[in-house]
Image: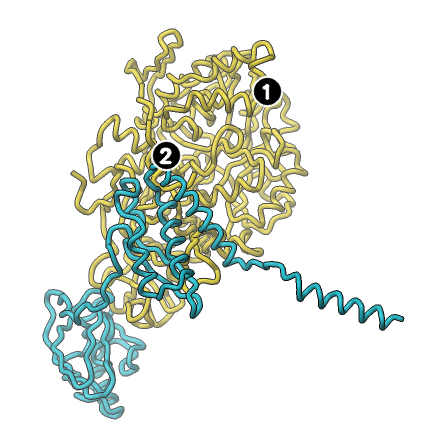
Chain colours: A cyan, B yellow
Amino acid sequence: MLSLMATLYLLMVGTHHRYCQPVRLSPREQNRLQVFAAAELARRRRARGLLLSQAEAVALICDEVMEAARDGLDYAAVEQRGYEILYPADVLEDVPRLVGRIELEALFADGHRLIVLHDPITSGGPPSLDAANAEPQWLEGGGPLRLANTSDVPIALTSHFHVFEANRRLHFDRAAAWGMRLAVAAGVKVVIEPGQTREVRVVPFGGARIVRGHGGLVDGPLDAPGALEAALALARERGYEGA
Amino acid sequence: MPDPAAIRLGDSDLWVAPESDEVSGPDEIIAGWGNTMRDGLGVRAERGGVEVAAVGGLVLDPVLGVRATSIGISDGRIVSVGRAGNPDTMDGIGVVLDTGTAVFDARGLVVTPGGIDCHVHLLSPQVCDAALAAGLTTLVTQDFGPVWNLGTNPPEAEAMMWAAFDAIPVNLAMLVRASSARPGPVVHALARGGAGLKIHEDVGAGPEQIRCALDIADRHDVQLAIHTDGLNEALSLEDTYAAFAGRTVHAYHIEGVGGGHAPNLLELAGRERVLTSSTTPTVPFGAGAEAEHLAMVAAVHVLEPGSRAGDAEILRHRVREWTMSAESVLHDLGVIHMLSSDSQGMGRIGEVVRRAFQCADAMKAQAGAEPGPADNERVLRYLAKVTINPAITHGLAADVGSLEVGKLADIVLWAPELFAVRPELILKAGMPAWGSSGDGDGSTMMVEPVTVGPQFAATGSAPAQASLAFLAGVSLEAELPTRRRRARVHGCRDLAAADMVRNTRTGTVTVDAAAREVRLDGERMRARPVERMAFSGSYLLG
């Protein structure tokens, strides 16, 4: 008897699951509806001839881009769509400036994809990534140094790295780079492609002139007697070119 | 012409320009791939740094001024202000970063102290969300839920509030009801978790209550916030002033529509020992202010102007467009010291910071720009009204109100274009308590919809760690259900207008109801109604 009831119960549950699937919205989907609600408010206001505010503009752009993906457009087309939804004449005076960057994710056939729009009301399209490997702006007072990449991978030097300790497959006058960093603004990188030789400019470190970390050749005060010689010896031992 | 280095705040015509720069230069600290915030590069490879740092922002502070600089934080307190970096390889480092330092990147952001609302009716917990979302980190409060109690009495309620607030990342100072002709009930509440006193005419603001409350305030070094007798039933303005007997008070909603001697409460402004605040709905004076207040006063104060005799008359005497018009000018001249909300009791808590800068912008348009750099002086004057001045007035200034070394690291980071509207991040004791973040399922932090909401210091048991319990000396050792660190309210009694940062002007304010005009030392005070506010319609959905 009991087992019959249990069987009936299991059948009922099974039936329920097969024919009655609740929607079970995830937090992400609820957020999607929030964007839609704000966008719909924006659309109605626009239809009444109003210029849009920051929140209205962002919501409307997001919603339209997400729907373009839903329509089956590919990534590039959807991204471009983001730049063609609103123009300065559609929004309040200050709004183009207030909508600088929008990050959103749309559901494509291959899943969610991040789209980042830059100044979508004024720029007309995504920024180009083809910026040439431009010569950095060198800080004043830097001395020259020629670096040759003898390896088969690109080597990127950054603004505050102790050049003396850079990758051992970079060939240059190591002693001349003692206590030096690239003469560039913080965050600027100089990339030396495999086989390439580049001339850079270097400036001395300031502060207490203590170098720790980096390539592991110093770990102490730069100006201590014998520090350079000891570091050069270690560099030679470890195969640093130009030491 | 704006200063070329100046930054525009929001969509307003307010500009700020750094008076010193301890950020830019070759040694800027930048987080991220291949940038300078790396071990042994921009951050020291040994200890010796601060625990937390807000690096590279434009600091607006009523005491420190406008500075491009960084802030170092240890144990929840500000320990250094200056150039951030690694002193081993960089010159002029004031905020030492090491590999153990947590860095909040404030580059491109405006950095202010957390705001202080010194007039909060805590009529619901939702008030706190609105406060945090608007950049407030310290609340001076009354009430404990939907009860018009005008003080956080009785001690059972104080205990409940301390227990509740361990989940809310704001510093709390509770005022107890001092509308009492006898000291017993007041001290009873003050000694069980209170931080100050409140007199309100709805529960009694006569001469005996005022004298009794000020005796207690003097004895325990706390402030008295007062809403005076708007009916002039027991006493007129000069009688109230006489009852102060030269002792310092904090006069709430000094324009008067929030309550107090009608029509001339504003005459208390400009006096040496009366510290004054406004509430948000009248500042700056807006086109719809009078109409809104006819509805608001009746709704909040249980009037029936259409049916009960006398209600229409007292309402008409209380709601005066011409004193509202004068109030904004008195703010601009630094005669009125503070701006507060009167949340849910005739004011909006999310507007405290915003209204201050809306008023600054409106008054720049009407009174003209002041000598530079940029609008720094005016911006800092208004910032002081919602940060350091309420802190000083209520005895909190040893811990909050500015970004000076030694204070709790309650810091608000704003994108300049969203300033006073949508904060980026609110640090509470140096930890992220509230801020802008995107969909939790996003591949970046800012996937839309980006909303302003709780961060980790607002979660679990972290809020109590990040927040202070402000208490009168008499209740500092009281048994209270809170894990917060306690801070003693002090320095409230010898205060005068000269102690109000950047808002020190005194003078004789006269209110002439027949002529419908307000004068300061004979000069007429009148602002035009603002038709379109900055920091508002360009942004908000509604």
Q: Earlier in the sequence, mark 1 or mark 2?
A: 1
Distance from Cα at disc 1 to Cα at disc 2: 30 Å
Q: Is residue B92 left or right of residue B354?
A: left
Q: Secondary structure at mark 1?
A: loop
Q: Position of residue B395 (x, y in %)?
A: 47, 37
- In the rendered structure, find residue B46 and report the number of the disc placed on it: none
Placement of A190 over or under A40, stated as above or below: below
- Quarter holding the C terminus of chain B is top left
Rendered residue at 61%/42% (across/down): B161
Q: Residue furthest right?
A: A1
Q: Secondary structure at mark 2?
A: helix
Q: Position of residue B224 (x, y in %)?
A: 51, 28
Q: Is residue B253 left or right of residue A240?
A: right
Residue indicated by mark 1: B204
The answer to whether residue B51 of the structure is visible from this angle is no
Rendered residue at 13%/67% (across/down): A138
Residue indicated by mark 2: B356
Placement of A120 over or under B3, stated as above or below: below
Q: Is residue B195 left or right of residue B18?
A: right
Q: Viewer-proximal residue, A89 or B116?
A: A89
- Of the two numbered discs 1 and 2 in the rendering, the one whose residue sits closer to the viewer: 2
Q: Amino acid at mark 2?
A: Ala
Q: Residues within 10 Å of mark 2 (few under 14, many from 20)?
A: many
Q: Viewer-proximal residue, A121 or A150?
A: A121
The answer to whether residue B178 of the structure is visible from this angle is yes
Q: Amino acid at mark 1?
A: Gly
Placement of B184 over or under A239, stated as above or below: above
